[in-house]
Image (cartoon, rainbow, N blue to C red):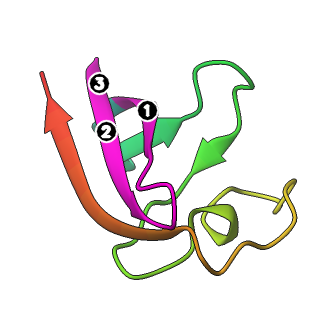
């Protein structure tokens, strides 16, 4: 299991934490720890657009700037 921190480029300069697992069949998979939503983080893309099923309103100002994984 990995802890993943995404640095977001926004007015508040926030961070968002995810849980990551390296699987044999699907590679790295990421989930929000509180909601269980699956996330497909992509640098330069808004965080809200990376969550499976898009359960959040789109926020173009929350661009993913960097993804850091710690094992």
Query: Which residue position is annotated with label 2?
Result: 5
Q: Residue 9 location in percent, x, y?
A: 40, 69
Q: Which residues are magenta?
A: 1-20
Q: Identify the mark nearer the N-term, 1 or 2.
A: 2
Q: Secondary structure at mark 2?
A: strand
Q: Residue 1 location in percent, x, y?
A: 28, 17
Query: Which residue position is annotated with label 1?
Result: 17
Residue drawn at point x = 55 percent, y = 34 percent = 31
Image position of 65 (left or right of 54): left
Foreground disc of the pair 1, 3: 1
Q: Residue 32 location in percent, x, y?
A: 59, 32
Q: Are marks 1 and 2 in contact (CB under 8 Å)?
A: yes
For mark 2, does the 10 Å Cα neighbourhood hold few (<14), some (14 to 19), or many (20 or more) residues?
some
Nearest the eye: 52 or 24: 52
| 63 shown above or below 55 | below
Q: Secondary structure at mark 3?
A: strand
| 48 shown above or below 32 | below
Nearest the eye: 28 or 61: 61
Q: Which mark is residue 3?
A: 3
Give me the C-alpha separation between circle 1 and circle 3. Answer: 7 Å
The quadrant in which the C terminus is found is top left
Q: Is 16 a magenta residue?
A: yes
Residue drawn at point x = 45 percent, y = 32 percent = 18
Q: Secondary structure at mark 1?
A: strand
Residue drawn at point x = 83 percent, y = 59 percent = 53
- Tell me the quarter of the picture where residue 35 sits: top right
Q: Is 45 a magenta residue?
A: no
Q: Identify the mark nearer the N-term, 1 or 3.
A: 3
């Amino acid at each position: 299991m990995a802890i993943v921190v995404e640095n977001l480029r926004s007015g508040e300069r926030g961070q968002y934490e995810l849980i990551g697992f390296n699987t044999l069949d699907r590679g790295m998979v990421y989930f929000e720890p509180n909601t269980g939503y699956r996330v497909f983080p992509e640098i330069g893309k808004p965080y809200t657009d990376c969550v499976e099923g898009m359960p959040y309103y789109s926020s173009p100002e929350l661009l993913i700037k960097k993804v850091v994984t710690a094992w």
